[in-house]
Image: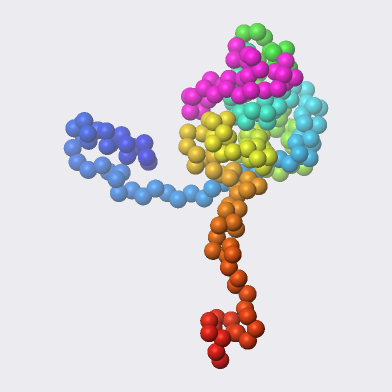
């Protein structure tokens, strides 16, 4: 709706559309936010135990890549060996078409370099089905549509719970607006603590003194 409204605004500005913007009076639909699930450390261990039992030689490393860097499954699938260098991973085939680079530890970096060819895709075939089958062998229950995406949510959630800041997370995940990243704000250990620290209750004694009635400021009966 926003894009269509913008198209007509441009057309009106260029005098290619004569009349009012037909989308100007249309109100945006309010949609409830989908709860973002993430894996606990115990669930992560259970998942990777199941992944190691898979016949796919790619699924474990792809899942690790998503979990360690916050990548989408499709970004991991399309990663080329040329973009794994100097202990960093660069994603170029992203949803918003913006490149982003993530550092990785040296051990995982060497695993990536050794896994695929020197040029081209590191993972020539998709391992989505192998991931699905491994997930089904665990007791993990996820909301609809968050199967492989739970790895990205898990990275972001643990990043914030461990003290990471939202602006850095926004750059890591490649969100165009901070509003998308704010979905993880409630996981911060310091989330809204200012309400306790700076709110009106601070330094105010709200206990009743003997002989007063609740709601009676004078204490008279």
Up/down of 42 relative to 195, above or below: above
Residue 109, image x, y percentages? 70, 18
Q: Which quarter of the rendering shows the C terminus?
A: bottom right
Within the magenta stretch, is there residue 87? Answer: yes
**Residue 131, quarter of the rendered image:** top right
In front here: 38 or 186? 186
Q: Residue at x 54, y 43 (%)?
A: 182
Q: Say left or right for 52 vs 125.
A: right
Within the magenta stretch, is there residue 130? Answer: no
Residue 139, image x, y percentages? 77, 42
Q: Residue at x 57, y 33 (%)?
A: 168
Q: Residue at x 32, y 36 (%)?
A: 6
Q: Say left or right for 81 vs 174.
A: right
Residue at the extreme bottom of the image, as rendered: 221
Up/down of 165 relative to 26, above or below: above
Highlighted range, magenta: 82-110
Q: Which quarter of the rendering shows the N terminus?
A: top left
Q: Is residue 1 visible?
A: yes
In front here: 205 or 43? 205
In front here: 83 or 36? 83
Residue at the extreme front of the image, as rendered: 203
Q: Is residue 138 visible?
A: no
Up/down of 135 relative to 61, above or below: below
Number of numbered discs visible in the structure rendering:
0
Residue 200, image x, y percentages? 54, 64
Q: Say left or right for 91 vs 25.
A: right
Q: Residue at x 45, y 50 (%)?
A: 30
In front here: 86 or 205? 205
**Residue 211, quarter of the rendered image:** bottom right
């Amino acid at each position: 709706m926003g894009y269509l409204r913008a198209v007509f605004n441009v057309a009106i500005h260029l005098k290619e559309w004569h009349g009012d913007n037909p989308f100007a009076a249309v109100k945006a639909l309010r949609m409830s936010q989908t709860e973002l699930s993430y894996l606990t450390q115990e669930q992560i261990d259970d998942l990777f135990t199941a992944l190691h039992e898979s016949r796919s030689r790619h699924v474990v490393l792809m899942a690790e890549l998503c979990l360690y860097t916050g990548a989408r499954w499709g970004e991991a699938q399309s990663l080329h060996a040329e973009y794994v260098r100097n202990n960093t991973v660069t994603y170029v085939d992203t949803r918003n078409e913006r490149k982003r680079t993530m550092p990785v530890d040296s051990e995982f970096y060497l695993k990536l370099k050794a896994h695929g060819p020197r040029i081209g895709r590191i993972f020539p075939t998709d391992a989505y089905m192998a991931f699905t089958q491994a997930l089904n062998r665990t007791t993990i229950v996820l909301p609809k549509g968050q199967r492989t995406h739970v790895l990205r949510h898990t990275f972001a959630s643990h990043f914030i719970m461990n003290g990471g800041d939202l602006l850095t997370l926004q750059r890591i995940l490649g969100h165009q607006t901070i509003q998308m990243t704010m979905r993880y704000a409630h996981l911060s250990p310091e989330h809204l603590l200012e309400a306790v620290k700076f709110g009106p209750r601070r330094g105010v004694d709200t206990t009743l003194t003997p002989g007063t009635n609740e709601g009676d400021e004078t204490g008279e009966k």
